[in-house]
């Protein structure tokens, strides 16, 4: 049994450290199972692979327009018409080098150094890190059962009073990483209305759309034309390494975003754009993958509490279980390090996502195969007894 009664004196052990150590152990012959990173175990859709092979055979891969090819933008406009019933002008769509580039472009175009931007805590650590690197003031707003694990106008008002700031922007992910929260339509509408009334930029991270298992999957574009939506082919489309994503922008922001994109990125990779265009037609194939995540989710909802790891937030979407480890440890970094060293199971310490209270939590990705997830939990069950 692993037990720590107080915060141990160990070096920080964050997600990329976990991944690096897991890779090192696997190379040394250890039977590592990784639940540390949000990377689907499935390949990119067959149509995407075939389109990429055909493009490579022609050997004419080069620069595109800074905001991407017309073909991919028109395909995405059709996607919004088909999935959300929306008529989106393709000219409002910007193709990006992954969602990470989308965040950079949005932050650089919308904010000045010193501006205050609110994010959820716990939340994706890259938000905090990118905002901080750009000289912006990060306001982390606790999301709890009381707020339904999402941002609310009331919590944003309270955060502004407590920090003595006027928000210039908010960033919300739904489904969320690491909590799995799906912000419902009414709650999303309340946020959109609050931002509009207070001249606050509303950035909606929708990279886990397509991976909702409970609740309402609503795009902010259904509620307002002023939202800045960021999405990616990495998660639902199983294309993490292709580094391709997109933004949907208010018309007034298209040219400012384009100018910044021209300077920073020249253009998104053409090969990835060709593959992504084909991937948009692979819903039937991808929904089979989604069913495997759903089976893993159902398994974890049952087994995690049985082995002493209750789920700390909803598992309504994305592919993460955010669990409470306080029965065994109040140092999630030490917990992660020992679990990898002793039973070859990798997971991410909660401090990555919540600098204040994440010592009590862990994030476990269930994007792997059903057999891997089952084996990992059985190893943990024996270890924790």
Image (cartoon, helix red, strand yellow):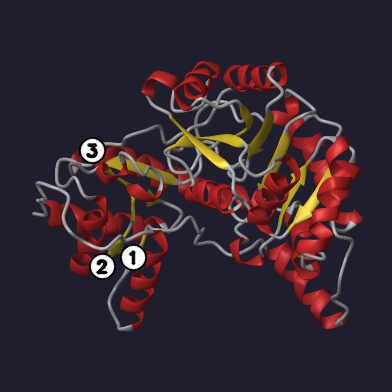
192 sits to left or right of 95: left
Number of other residues with Cα within 10 Å of mark 2, as a class: few under 14, some 14 to 19, many 20 or more = many
Q: Residue at point 12% right, 47% down?
A: 6
The disc label shown at residue 344, or none: 2
Q: Earlier in the sequence, mark 3 or mark 2?
A: 3
Distance, label 3 to label 1, CA atoms, is 20 Å
The image shows residue 174 at horizontal and vertical percentages of 56, 35
Question: SS of the residue at dot 3?
Answer: helix
- The reply to whether residue 233 is in sight is no
Closer to the N terminus: mark 1 or mark 2?
1
Task: Say few, some or many: other residues with alpha carbon within 10 Å of mark 1 (under 14 / 14 to 19 / 20 or more).
Answer: some
Spatial CA distance of label 3 from label 2 is 21 Å
Q: Which residue is mark 3?
A: 305
Dot 1 and dot 2 residues touching (CB under 8 Å): yes
Judge whether 151 appears above or below 272 on screen. Answer: above
Q: Residue at x 33, y 38 (%)?
A: 301
On screen, 99 above or below 78?
Answer: below
Left or right of 124, for residue 371 = left
Categorize mark 3 by other alpha carbons within 10 Å: few (<14), some (14-19), many (20+).
few
86 vs 255, nearest the viewer: 255
| Residue of label 1 | 33
What is the x, y in percent for residue 188?
A: 61, 23
Residue 170: where, in percent of width, then height?
61, 32
Give the image location of residue 363, x and y in percent: 36, 48
Q: Quadrant of residue 47?
A: bottom right
Is 258 placed above or below 25 here? above
């Amino acid at each position: 049994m692993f037990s720590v009664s107080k915060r141990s004196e160990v070096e920080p052990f964050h997600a990329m450290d976990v991944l690096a150590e897991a890779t090192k152990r696997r190379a040394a012959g250890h039977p590592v199972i990784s639940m540390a990173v949000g990377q689907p175990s499935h390949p990119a859709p067959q149509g995407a692979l075939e389109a990429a092979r055909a493009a490579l055979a022609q050997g004419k891969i080069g620069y595109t327009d800074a905001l991407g090819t017309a073909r991919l933008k028109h395909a995405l406009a059709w996607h919004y018409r088909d999935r959300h019933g929306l008529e989106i002008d393709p000219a409002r769509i910007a193709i990006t080098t992954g969602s990470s580039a989308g965040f950079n472009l949005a932050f650089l175009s919308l904010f000045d150094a010193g501006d205050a931007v609110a994010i959820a805590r716990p939340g994706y650590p890259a938000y905090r890190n990118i905002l901080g690197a750009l000289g912006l003031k990060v306001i982390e707003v606790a999301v709890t059962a009381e707020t339904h694990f999402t941002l609310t106008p009331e919590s944003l008002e309270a955060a502004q009073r407590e920090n003595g700031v006027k928000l210039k922007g908010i960033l919300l992910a739904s489904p969320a990483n690491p909590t799995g929260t799906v912000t419902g339509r009414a709650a999303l509408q309340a946020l959109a209305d609050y931002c509009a009334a207070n001249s606050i930029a509303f950035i909606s991270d929708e990279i886990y759309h397509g991976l909702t298992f409970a609740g309402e999957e609503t795009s902010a574009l259904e509620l307002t034309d002023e939202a800045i939506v960021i999405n990616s082919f990495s998660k639902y489309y199983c294309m993490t390494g292709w580094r391709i994503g997109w933004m949907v922008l208010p018309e007034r922001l298209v040219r400012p975003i384009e100018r910044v994109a021209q300077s920073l990125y020249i253009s998104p990779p053409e090969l990835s754009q060709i593959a992504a265009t084909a991937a948009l037609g692979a819903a039937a194939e991808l929904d089979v993958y989604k069913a495997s995540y759903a089976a893993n989710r159902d398994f974890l909802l049952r087994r995690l509490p049985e082995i002493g790891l209750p789920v700390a937030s909803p598992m309504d979407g994305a592919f993460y279980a955010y669990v409470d480890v306080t029965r065994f440890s109040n140092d999630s970094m030490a917990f992660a390090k020992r679990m990898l060293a002793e039973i070859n199971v990798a997971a991410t310490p909660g401090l990555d996502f919540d600098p204040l209270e994440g010592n009590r939590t862990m994030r476990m990705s269930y994007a792997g195969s059903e057999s891997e997830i089952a084996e990992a939990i059985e190893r943990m069950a024996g270890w924790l007894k």
